[in-house]
């Protein structure tokens, strides 16, 4: 399992907390964003005491007390928080069980129901989360947290209109760092990258008023860094990732985003140093693959081969573990085992019909030599209107394989115009494709 917010400004929340994440699924231009953020300043897990200690405290209080729904809800909130801080899905899985026990003891306890919905969103069980949220709405649960979660769940599955309705109502009720950060995510998916950057800057400024844990505070420069990166402002993005790590050295999203951006920016030695520290801890297939690419670019074929082997082992071991990791495994397997990547990407699409699902399936189909099917998928992905360099590059290669050189040229030109450094390896491939097609490239 990788230590990422992959569980990514896909915001996962308990009744008073929400996990914000931008899925790498939204594009390969950057890793997931993951952090727990509060609606307003109401955060049930505050202070600097380590979360494992807080969890043990609540475990002790509920032991032998099957009817203690209040402390079980507090335990669930702490487990959700730990899942966000570590990007480890198993904590969300346990939290869901605990919230379920709280609801068994008191079915009308709204904080437990919303906490359960947050846990389910983090595990990408969106249908079950929406069911819980419909029950919460019927029970008249707290309006703002419910709206936040409704928006998060719908954003996660690609229901962008429903997400927009929830987020617009949310921000009308409270313009705070957590609500503005959600609107930033929505604007990026809607194809408004400049608005996403502006809103992320606002969220960062507003976050200074929140009484939140260091990892939660680091989310805001991390989110801003992500949107700067996908908008092509790579140096500024790197600065924001470093700022996030200054606040929380173990922030899972920033720890992965920084070497990715460094490698994309040609700073390979620094990227290799970062990956060497990160990979043994995270152990995710896609991270091994990215590290292998950096080592290969540095001429270390032996080291790259080791990372390729470790990545393959991690991918095969993780296939049946957590749905939230499936898309990252697809990223690793696409160029290495396209047939398996297609199978996994189809399973992902069945759960999340968002722009990233269609893009990943299209790219896997392309690598499997099925350009006709890939073309249908990439056209659906493009139909969402998201402005993303990786998505446009994939569209260029797929259209070229399908025999449409003119459309391919237009898309690769768009890709490089958005961000000529969008990926450590694919950006170079895009530049090479542009040269072959006679497309003028940015300076």
Image (cartoon, rainbow, N blue to C red):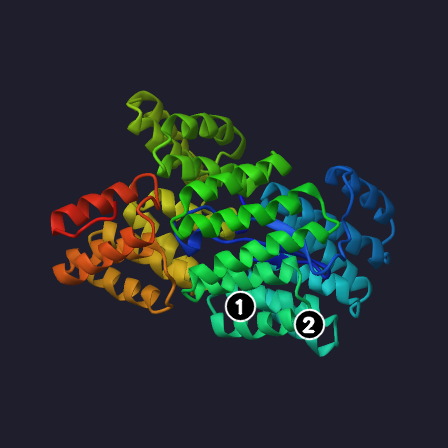
20 or 57, nearer to the observer: 20
* Picture quarter with the C terminus: top left
Tag 2 secondary structure = helix
In this rendering, position of residue 335 left or right of residue 69: left
Return the disc, 2 or 1, that comes first in the chain's sequence.
Answer: 1
Which residue lies at the image location 30% right of the left edge and 28% below the top edge? 296
Judged left or right of residue 328, residue 371 is left
As displayed, is residue 286 above or below residue 24?
above
Q: Which residue is mark 1?
A: 154
Which residue occupies the foreground of this view, 400 or 197?
197
Residue 1 makes an appearance in the image:
no
The answer to which quarter of the image holds residue 82 is top right
> Viewer-proximal residue, 330 or 400?
400
Q: Which residue is mark 2?
A: 173
| Residue 213: quadrant of the picture | top right
Q: Which mark is residue 184?
A: none
Relative side of 104 to 120, left or right:
right
């Amino acid at each position: 399992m990788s230590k990422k917010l992959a569980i990514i400004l896909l915001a996962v929340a308990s009744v008073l907390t929400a996990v914000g994440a931008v899925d790498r699924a939204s594009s390969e231009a950057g890793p997931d964003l993951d952090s727990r953020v509060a609606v307003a300043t109401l955060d049930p897990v505050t202070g600097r005491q380590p979360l494992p200690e807080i969890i043990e405290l609540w475990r002790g209080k509920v032991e032998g007390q099957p009817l203690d729904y209040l402390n079980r809800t507090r335990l669930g909130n702490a487990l959700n928080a730990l899942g966000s801080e570590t990007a480890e899905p198993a904590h969300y899985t346990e939290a869901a069980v605990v919230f379920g026990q709280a609801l068994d003891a008191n079915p009308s306890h709204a904080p437990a129901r919303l906490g359960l919905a947050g846990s389910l969103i983090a595990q990408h069980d969106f249908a079950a989360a929406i069911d819980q949220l419909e029950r919460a709405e019927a029970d008249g649960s707290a309006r703002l947290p419910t709206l936040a979660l409704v928006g998060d769940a719908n954003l996660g599955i690609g229901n962008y209109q429903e997400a927009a309705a929830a987020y617009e109502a949310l921000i009308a009720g409270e313009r705070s760092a957590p609500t503005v950060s959600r609107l930033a995510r929505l604007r990026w998916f809607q194809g408004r990258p400049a608005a996403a950057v502006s809103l992320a800057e606002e969220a960062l400024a507003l976050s200074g008023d929140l009484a939140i844990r260091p990892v939660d505070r680091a989310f805001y420069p991390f989110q801003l860094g992500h949107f700067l990166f996908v908008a092509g402002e790579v140096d500024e993005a790197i600065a924001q990732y470093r700022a996030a790590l200054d606040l929380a050295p173990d922030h899972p999203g920033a720890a992965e985003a920084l070497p990715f951006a460094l490698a994309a920016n040609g700073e390979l030695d620094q990227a290799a140093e970062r990956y060497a520290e990160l990979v043994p801890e995270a152990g995710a297939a896609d991270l091994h693959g990215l590290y292998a690419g950096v080592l290969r670019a540095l001429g270390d074929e032996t080291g790259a081969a080791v990372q390729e082997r470790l990545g393959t082992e991690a991918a095969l071991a993780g296939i049946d573990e957590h749905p939230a990791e499936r898309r990252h495994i697809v990223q690793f397997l696409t160029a290495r085992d396209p047939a398996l990547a297609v199978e996994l990407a189809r399973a992902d699409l069945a759960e999340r019909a968002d722009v990233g699902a269609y893009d990943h399936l299209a790219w896997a189909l392309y690598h499997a030599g099925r350009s006709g099917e890939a073309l249908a998928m990439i056209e659906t992905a493009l139909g969402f209107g998201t402005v993303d360099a990786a998505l446009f590059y994939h569209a260029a290669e797929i259209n070229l394989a399908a025999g449409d050189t003119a459309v391919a040229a237009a898309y690769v030109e768009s890709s490089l115009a958005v961000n000529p450094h969008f990926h450590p390896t694919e950006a170079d491939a895009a530049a090479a494709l542009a040269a072959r097609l006679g497309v003028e490239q940015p300076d």
